[in-house]
Amino acid sequence: MQIADEELELLVADLHDRYGYDFSGYARASLKRRFERLAGLDKFPSFAEFRYKILKDPVYIKRVVEEITVNVTEMFRDPHFYLALRAEILPVLATYPFIRIWLAGVASGEEAYSMAILLYEANLLHKTLIYATDINPAVLDVARKGIYPAAKMKQYSENYLAAGGKGDFSEYYTARYGYIKLNEELSRRMIFSTHNLVSDATFNEFQVIICRNVLIYFDKTLQDRVFHLFNDSLDIFGFIALGSKETLKFSGMSDKYKVLKSGEKIWRKIS
Amino acid sequence: MAEDLIGPGYQCVVIGGSAGSIKVLIDALPAITPHLRLAIVVVLHRKNAADNSLLVHLLRSKTLMLVKEIEEKEPICSGICYIAPPDYHVLVEKDRTFSLDASEKVNFSRPSIDVTFESAAVVYGASLACVLLSGANSDGAHGLIMAGAHNALIAIQDPATAEMPAMPRSAMNVVENYHILQPEQLAGFINNLA
């Protein structure tokens, strides 16, 4: 199904007025594509029927939010990023008595477990709290359980090695019936919570904030809001990491940050 | 292929390719006029992310045009050759900026040619040209149908000249109006668009 521009604005208004979800700051081309994809998946014959379902069925809204937001993630995605974390950030964190890390837009949690493995191998996990947040409660349930399809483990195991992993990746999980469950030692230091970057405020102070491939879906105005939120939530000398195509450069606060390592999207707050 | 019948006035050309397409592009680039008044957007499938900076360097060495990897929210300007980054779909916003999307693969591909053809067609309509080159899967075919519905100009590499004919062939099976392009005609085709 093709959704026209003005129809898209109707859906954005419906979600906000009826359910309090504000997608008005989302980049329209990908938002439109997500709605079209969902209408296709659920086989709506017309826009009118799609919209009616959204307006009348509060249960369906859960699915809408789940499918409109992008939840594609993997363990140790962009292994060089994790290499940089290991080499440049963990040695600094090691000097702190207590470490708080915020993973914003964590989806089904693969990044949180990757981070936990890194911290575990550096012997820092015991003094760390990982705050894993997402707009979408359903994916956080998956994250909390730490159960993933076993078919993905080959890729993740290669990523783990490319990310400088020194152990045997298979020791971090147990496999059964086509699924794996990551060890509970890894999730013991995680706190899962819904948090909407569009509307919610800061909730703690962190030494590291990681938010990868979330801002690409936001327009400039919303990106700026989120940069301010992160800035207010980050300790001086803390680190911000973004996705490989995202940047702080045009955020209006780039003078407060310096690039940690060229080629990596990691910044350190210097004032 | 009546390339001399194609008048100027196009603002953007999206070139999609997969296996066997890089050579076609590299051979064409030196003959493409560097200050063309249209934007060139290249969406190629690659095996891994590390290939991309190599690809950008390689293409750069073949032209005086600015060749760059797409940044998110970047305005689309004429005279520039934009390369889709690995692992992101490339979309076009109404204000003629790029936006990137890391969602599910389409046709086992990210970037997907379908996604960019469709999205560019909605924004550029009849001032868009789409070129589909060699490849081993069927990405691009559905996007060309949508592009055709928005009156975009469509050119498909002659499968007989393609290292991997499956991609041009599957597009030809479903698209109605298109030009057949020989690899050596690509540069002239693009020069005539603007």
Image (cartoon, coloured by chain):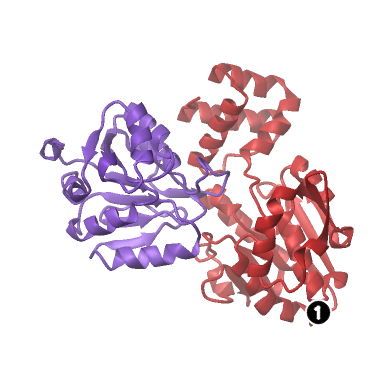
Q: Is residue B2 above or below residue A81?
A: above
The colour chain B appears in is purple
Q: Nearer the viewer, residue A121 or A21?
A: A121
Q: Nearer the viewer, residue B118 or A136?
A: B118
The colour chain A appears in is red
* x and y, in percent, of residue A245 in the image: 51, 59
Residue found farthest to the left: B4
Could you tell me which residue is drawn at 18 percent across and 50 percent down? Answer: B184
Instruction: Using the rendered image of the protein, determine whether residue A175 is visible from the camera's viewpoint.
Output: yes
Q: Identify the subunit bearing mark 1.
A: A
Q: Left of A52 or right of it: where is B64? A: left
User: How many discs mark residues in the rendered view?
Assistant: 1
Q: Nearer the viewer, residue A205 or B33?
A: B33
Where does label 1 land, which residue? A96
Q: Left of B79 or right of it: where is B165? A: right
Q: Nearer the viewer, residue A268 or B41?
A: B41
* On-image quarter of the C terminus of chain A: bottom right
Could you tell me which residue is drawn at 74 percent across and 25 percent down? Answer: A58
Could you tell me which residue is drawn at 45 percent across and 63 percent down? Answer: B51
Quadrant in the picture for residue A95: bottom right
Q: Left of B90 or right of it: where is A52? A: right
Q: Amino acid at mark 1?
A: Tyr
Where disc 1 sits, the SS reads loop
Badge 1 density bin: few <14, some 14–19, many ≥20, Cα 10 Å: few
* x and y, in percent, of residue A215 in the image: 58, 53
Instruction: Using the rendered image of the protein, determine whether residue B157 is visible from the camera's viewpoint.
Output: no
* x and y, in percent, of residue A111 in the image: 71, 58
Q: Left of B70 or right of it: where is A239? A: right
* x and y, in percent, of residue A109 in the image: 74, 53
